[in-house]
Amino acid sequence: MPKPEDPFRSPYDTEPEEQDLWFLPATEEEEGGPRPRGAAALPWETADRRPLLDPEDWLKAERAQGRALTAAAVAFARLDERLRAGPEGLVRRLALMDVSDLLWSEGVRIAPERLALYVNLRAGAPAEGDRELALAGWAFRRLLGGPGPLEGLHDFLGRRPAPADGLLDFSQRPVGPAFDGLAEDWRAVLERGEALHPISRAGCAFAAWRSFGLSGAGAVLEPAVVAARLGGGEGRALTFLPLAIGERNALRAGGGSPEERLAGWYRGIETACLRGYMELDRLTEWQRRASETLSDLSGRTPPALVAALLAAPVLSAEMAAATVGVSFSAAARNLALFEERGLVREVTGQERFRFWTVRA
């Protein structure tokens, strides 16, 4: 019995079995071979659906850049070994230098001495609404320790979950479910890249973070701190991978093929580690000069104050008194003597609450 005709059916409609569902992938025909259909049969090229960052490509690039990777790894290991034999505070000094230069990549210039004042005593805090120093303080703390990026990104970044009242976030960075989804994609890239050397994996993490836009367009500090912690590893004196001390070559390696990116990444890390090594040489020379300049002084306070100045990027009389174990007046008197002999310089430019740093 024939089917009754649909009164609402257009004469241009086709039967369902005759429709070419172009949005579905090609199917295998019974008589063999895939039949091109829909987008597969278009006369122009379709969009490339390969992943944005394929760790297999990075593994190939790592093998091709083996010599550059070795140079970066050796420079990092030498710096780490040098720090093991030096005063405890040298790692903090290098972290301040690295954060200062990382901020410069975002157009913000904060000297390491000013940053040290902020992280130690919250001195020189910016006006309300200006977040650069607070962001720098976060980066400094994360480079030195705390939860790692793989242990929980919200805790690592210090971000609060998206508000439940539906208010919009105008910071241009993803929040809430959008951030969580992109973070899962980023973690998936790292999981597929576990075979990479830690330095290479950090570079892949930096590139993937920026490609997925987890910190918004043009952001450098957050992805750089994430990558630096991933590259630092466990059991080292240096808890982070230096990326920007003196120069920012590693951060400029944001485009091109994986081989081009890794070449710039390795070169930037090697340069940053060598600059850090030069800073340690500068402080060692200052220590030698201080010993000669203060050779006519007796007592334990001058040499103890020299060690305190090596360990701390900036030092106040109160901090010196607590570190060395002397009275405030004795610490202030010795700092004034150090300044008179050209060993330190005052960085605040004020009469009270003054801070000094080495003049090398």
Image (spheres, rainbow, N blue to C red):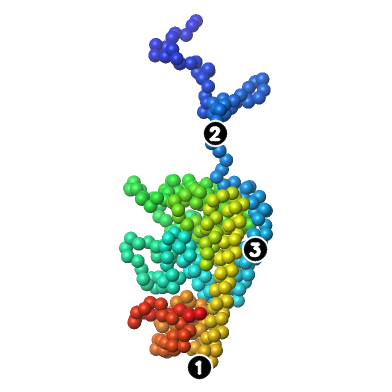
Q: Which of 334 and 239 is in front in this view?
A: 334
Report x, y in % for residue 213.
47, 49
Q: Which of marks 1 and 2 is nearer the N terminus?
A: 2
Report x, y in % for residue 248.
52, 62
Label 1 sits on a secondary structure element that is loop
Q: Which of 176 and 304 is in front in this view?
A: 304
Q: Residue at x 42, y 14 (%)?
A: 10
On the question of residue 260 being in view, the answer is: yes
Q: Name the residue under label 1.
A: 297
Q: Mark 2 points at which residue?
A: 46
Up/down of 329 relative to 248, above or below: below
* Mark 1 closeness class: few <14, some 14–19, many ≥20 residues within 10 Å: few
Give me the C-alpha separation between circle 1 and circle 2. Answer: 79 Å
Q: Which amino acid does label 1 sit on?
A: Leu
* Mark 2 closeness class: few <14, some 14–19, many ≥20 residues within 10 Å: few
Give me the C-alpha separation between circle 3 and circle 1. Answer: 44 Å
On the question of residue 229 being in view, the answer is: no
Q: Earlier in the sequence, mark 3 or mark 1?
A: 3
Report x, y in % for residue 251.
52, 58
